[in-house]
Structure formats: C-alpha cells, structure tokens
Amino acid sequence: MTRHSVRARATKGDCGEVLLLGCEGSGKTLLLRQIARQCSRERKDEQFSTATQPSVGVDIVSIKLGGRSYSLREVGGTMQPVWPKYFEACRGVIFVADASSMQQLSGAVVEWYNLVCAEHLRGKPLILVLNTRDTALPVSETMVEHLFRFCDAQAIMGELITKVQVNAATGVGLTSLLTWLDRSLPVLDP
C-alpha cells in the first residue's frame, strides 16, 4: 500500500483516481484497507484489524490490480460539503453505504442521489457498495433498489451505475467490487 500526493501525469497502466465516498461510519476506511490488503503482495492470512477511527480528511492509497494501477482517494464523511471539488478530476466513484440499519441507509440515500445528479460525474462509473458488516440487509434487495431509486439513477447514468454487497470487516463480496474496478476504468493514455 503506497500513500502519495496527487499525480502529475499518467504512466503506463495507470487508470487514474477513484473517489471512495460515504457518510460517516459507513465503513470506507475498513473497505479501503481490505482493498489494499487484497491487492498487495502481503500475506493475507495475517491478523487484520477492523478497528478504525472516523476519517477527518483525505487518504490516498495506490493499488495494483491486474497490471493496472489505481489511486483510491477516501474523502471523509464529515467532508461532504467539499466532495464536489474532487468530482472533475476523478475517473469514477465508489460510494459506501452502511446497510446494517435503516437509519444509516436513509442518510446514504440523499448523498447517493446527489452523486448521481452531479454534473461533473456524468459519464463516469459509480458503484453503490452496500456494506453489510456482520448482518444481512435490514430490508429486501427490492426495497434497497427502491430507496436508492436505482431505476431513476440508471435512467440518468445508464450502464455506468451498479451495486454490490460487501462486508468490509471480512472482505466477503470484495471480488465483485474489484472486478467492477478492473472493468469500469480503462487505462489512461500516458
């Protein structure tokens, strides 16, 4: 896992920056750690700490996936008012929603739809990550699609929107997210 400042220009195999957004306590930091762990050459059977602290800023992690490199920029939930400042430069968005309670889902719905309607995200892939922690969804999959107005979102963004269910603590479902990342963002021209 490599932390760095903003890139000057694309290099061979570079797929650019992906924003990792979500409301406070949604599991962004833990998901970022799981992604970095999965994509690293470190031993995956070593102890993995699920302890986190609220993100109060920006964290950038570089990963390699299938010969491609990505910069994942986690922007803290408390920084929601400044999220739009990062939209133009990003190539896509991973939005994490804590799906363990209706209260958390409700708060995430508003922010999700703000992303879907953001002008600077038009034409960029978005994925809704339903972080289930150690529980099943508190509502049916159909209700989640209704809450997040998935049909409306797809009418606006088309095929660029998808969703996955992931457990950020255990990594279950992470393969689907990594597959999306690999398929959704083509390599930048150097």
Image (cartoon, rainbow, N blue to C red):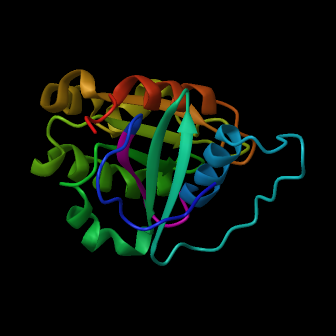
Q: Which residues are magenta?
A: 15-26
Rendered view: 128 above or below 72: above
Q: Is residue 163 left or right of residue 185?
A: right
Q: Residue at x 48, y 78 (%)?
A: 56
Q: Position of residue 108 (x, y in %)?
A: 39, 53
Hey, which quadrant is residue 147 in on the image?
top left
Q: Residue at x 56, y 39 (%)?
A: 64
Q: Nearer the viewer, residue 40 or 151?
A: 40
The residue positioned farthest toward the left in the image shown: 119
Say whether residue 115 is visible: yes
Q: Residue at x 26, y 27 (%)?
A: 160
Specify the quadrant that holds the N terminus: bottom right
Q: Position of residue 28 (x, y in %)?
A: 54, 56
Q: Position of residue 54 (x, y in %)?
A: 57, 73
Q: Position of residue 156 (x, y in %)?
A: 13, 32
Rendered view: 159 above or below 109: above
Residue 25 located within the stretch drawn in magenta: yes
Hey, which quadrant is residue 53 in on the image?
bottom right
Q: Is residue 52 left or right of residue 25?
A: right
Specify the quadrant that holds the C terminus: top left
Say whether residue 118 is visible: no
Question: Would you say the magenta stretch is mainly helix, strand or loop?
Answer: strand
The residue positioned farthest toward the bottom in the image shown: 56
